C-alpha cells in the first residue's frame, strides 16, 4: 500500500461487495477519497464505516440514471472534484439450458445496468473532468471478448461496453480524459451463482462447480483469479502510471483470451 492516489477523488459503482469492494479497499489504501454506490445498503454502509471520513456510501441503483447522477454529483460537491470513475456495477441475467429457451425477459434490466449505466456514468463523470482531465474505467468481461454459449444478453451487453469505451476514449481525448476497459475472467464472485435461478442450494453448488471446472480448463494460468487481481489492474488505469493509455481493453483472466492452454506433458516418472 502507498499513496498512488493521494489527493484524488474516485467514484465506484457496485462497490459494496465482490469486485467493487476490492476496488474501494484498494483505492482507499492508496490514499484516495472514495464515494461508492450499491443497491446493497447494509454492506455498503458497513464498508464505509470501517474507513471513516475518506469513504462515503450512497444507496444507488445504477439502472435509475438520476441516482447514478446524484452519486457522481455528491462526490464533486462534497470533495471538490472528480479524478477517477469506475463503472463496475453489473448483473448477469438468467442462465438458460439453451438460447432457444431464453424468453429475453431480463433483457431490459441487463442492458440498463451493464450498458446504459456505463454510458451515463461515463458521460456524467466526464462532464466534471473537462477542466482537469481524469480516468474512467469501465468493467466488461471476457464474455464480451470471446464468443460462447450461455447468458447471451450478458455477453452482448459486455461486448457493447468494449465498443462504447473505445468510442468514448476517442471523443473525450481532447479533454485529457482517458477511458479504458477491464475484462475480468475466472474471478470467484457471486455473479455466477446469481445466474442460476430456480435451483436449490445443492443444485447451485453443482452448477457453480461445473462452471469453475470449465473455467480451469480454459485458462493457461492454473490458479483462480481474485478480486484483488482486478483491483490492482484498475489501480494502474486510475493512477499516474498510465498517462498515455486510453481506449484499451485489458483482460485479467489468467490468459484465457489469449488462447487455450497447452496440455501438460507427462514426466517420465508419471508414465
Image (cartoon, grey):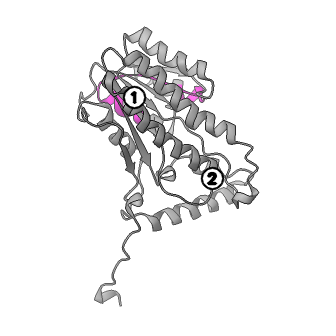
As drawn, the label of residue 171 is: 1
Q: Residue at x 60, y 18 (%)?
A: 66
Mark 1 → mark 2, Cα distance in angstroms: 31 Å
83 sits left or right of 161 in the view? left
Q: Residue at x 59, y 47 (%)?
A: 154
Quick check: is 31 in the magenta stretch? yes
Q: Position of residue 135 (x, y in %)?
A: 35, 28
- Tell me, yes or no, if residue 43 can be seen here: yes
Write down the residue under mark 2.
151
Label 1 crowd bin: few (<14), some (14–19), many (20+), radius 10 Å: few
- Tell me, yes or no, if residue 49 can be seen here: no
Q: Front-most of 164 and 252?
A: 164
35 sits left or right of 43 in the view? left
Query: Tag 1, which secondary structure?
Result: helix
Q: Earlier in the sequence, mark 1 or mark 2?
A: 2
In the picture, the quarter occupied by the C terminus is bottom left
Q: Is residue 20 above or below residue 210?
A: above
Q: Front-most of 265 and 135?
A: 135
Residues drawn in magenta: 23-44
221 sits left or right of 70 in the view? left
Q: Position of residue 61 (x, y in %)?
A: 61, 26
Q: Position of residue 3 (x, y in %)?
A: 24, 27
Query: Tag 2, which secondary structure?
Result: loop
Amino acid at each position: 500500500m502507498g499513496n498512488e492516489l493521494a489527493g484524488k477523488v474516485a467514484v465506484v459503482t457496485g462497490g459494496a461487495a465482490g469486485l467493487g469492494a476490492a476496488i474501494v479497499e484498494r483505492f482507499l489504501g492508496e490514499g484516495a477519497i472514495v464515494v461508492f454506490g450499491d443497491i446493497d445498503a447494509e454492506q455498503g454502509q458497513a464498508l464505509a464505516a470501517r474507513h471513516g471520513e475518506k469513504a462515503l456510501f450512497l444507496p444507488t441503483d445504477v439502472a435509475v440514471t438520476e441516482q447514478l447522477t446524484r452519486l457522481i454529483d455528491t462526490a464533486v460537491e462534497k470533495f471538490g472534484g472528480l479524478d477517477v470513475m469506475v463503472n463496475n456495477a453489473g448483473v448477469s441475467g438468467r442462465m438458460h439450458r439453451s438460447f432457444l429457451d431464453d424468453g429475453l425477459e431480463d433483457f431490459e434490466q441487463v442492458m440498463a445496468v451493464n450498458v446504459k449505466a456505463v454510458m451515463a456514468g461515463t458521460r456524467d463523470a466526464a462532464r466534471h473532468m473537462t477542466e482537469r482531465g481524469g480516468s474512467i474505467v469501465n468493467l466488461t468481461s471476457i464474455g464480451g471478448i470471446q464468443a460462447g454459449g450461455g447468458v447471451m444478453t450478458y455477453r452482448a451487453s459486455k461486448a457493447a461496453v468494449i465498443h462504447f469505451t473505445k468510442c468514448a476514449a476517442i471523443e473525450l481525448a481532447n479533454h485529457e480524459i482517458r477511458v479504458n476497459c477491464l475484462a475480468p475472467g475466472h474471478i470467484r464472485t457471486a455473479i455466477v451463482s446469481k445466474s442460476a435461478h430456480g435451483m436449490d442450494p445443492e443444485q447451485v453448488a453443482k452448477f457453480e462447480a461445473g462452471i469453475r471446472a470449465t473455467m480451469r480448463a480454459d485458462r493457461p494460468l492454473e490458479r483462480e483469479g481474485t478480486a484483488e487481481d482486478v483491483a490492482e489492474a484498475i489501480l494502474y488505469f486510475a493512477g499516474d502510471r498510465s498517462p498515455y493509455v486510453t481506449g484499451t481493453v485489458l483482460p485479467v483472466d489468467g490468459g484465457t483470451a489469449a488462447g487455450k492452454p497447452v496440455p501438460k506433458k507427462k514426466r517420465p516418472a508419471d508414465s
